[in-house]
Image (cartoon, rainbow, N blue to C red):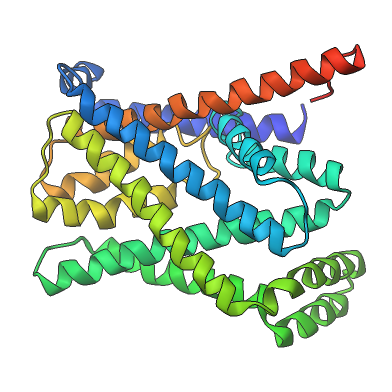
Amino acid sequence: MSRSLLIFLAKLVLSVALLWLVLTRLTWVEVREALIDPRWPWLAAAMAVYGLSAWGGALQWSWILRTAGLPTPVGEIRRLYFVGLFFNNFLPANIGGDGYKIMDLGRREGCPGRVFCATLLDRLVGLAALTVFAALAAVICVAFGVALPRIVWVLAAVLLFLLLALAMLVSRRLRARLPDLVRRMRLVTLADRIDGLADEFGVYRQRLPWLARVFLFSVGVQALRMLVHLLVAYGLRLDPDPTQTLQLAVLIPLLALSLTLPVTVNGIGLREWVTGALLVFTGLSEQGVVAMEMTAFLVMVAFSLLGGVLWWQRRALISDNSGRPEAG
């Protein structure tokens, strides 16, 4: 049995175990009751806002790729981004979409390393923006005396880690010292790869004010994605009050950060377990918040189907032009 299959089976087992833990406290009948008689205009608004955030995410990735010197048209970059969303939701791996984007664009432009670095930077900027958004919401909560669970302090550790990661990518000193440190550990091949990646990141090192503007734009993109969850909450008649809204603005990003851990199949099980354990702090019912996050996930999955259509269209076009199916 291959290592990749073993890892997938382990993730599947954990997904099932976490779902079982949720069902020991909650039944699907209770969740289904929370989905009865939704307000469809609110859910349609959630879909539209998520689409706008996806457009913003594609634009952010295109800016980073253009700065790296890639001449790919913005329309093609947007198509690849949407296809990546589709693979993220329908491949049994958290980085399936990123892997597809790097492989496809890197092969066509002849610089997979550069595309990898641009995509890694895009990911790190997005995660840092999400963390900063939650931290700002937490500061507002403290200012207005809104209670938060102690686990919110995890945001400080996550933000520190992400800032250190970004510093390692753009710092001249770390760029010079890290490969030497790795070579002393007799990992010459790895050191050479780090050297190559560090060279690719050099272009961003020269444009820190631009990177700061991209980061601020990314905070706006993440704010739109948090708005999707709130619109879904109103669509399911949970109607959070202002205090609960502030709490959700902190806790939903924590949930999203937990889902970046590649420990389950596409976050299945982990999403429901963390939701039931964390978002009930707001005073909303457990079945309500679980239904809310399941519906928000389905909104994102439904939009990502557009990426599947775009992928199939290109596959069919290349097949017609070449007379044979496209590989991958």
The C terminus, quarter of image: top right
**37 to 123, vertically: above or below:** above
Can you tell which quarter of the image residue 108 is in? top right
- In this view of the protein, can residue 25 be seen by the observer? no
Residue 213 at x, y = what percent?
50, 70
x, y percentage for residue 224? 35, 49
Q: Residue at x 70, y 41 (%)?
A: 101
- Give the farthest residue toward the bottom: 173
Residue placed at 47% from the left, 64% from the top? 128
Using residue 177 as the reference point, say whether residue 42 is left or right of it.
left
Judged left or right of residue 199, residue 232 is left
Can residue 295 be seen here? yes
Is the residue 32 above or below the residue 124 in the image?
above
Report the front residue among 322 and 19: 322
Tell me: residue 287, above or below residue 188.
above
Of 102 and 74, which appears nearest the observer? 74
Residue in view at x 70 percent, y 80 percent: 206
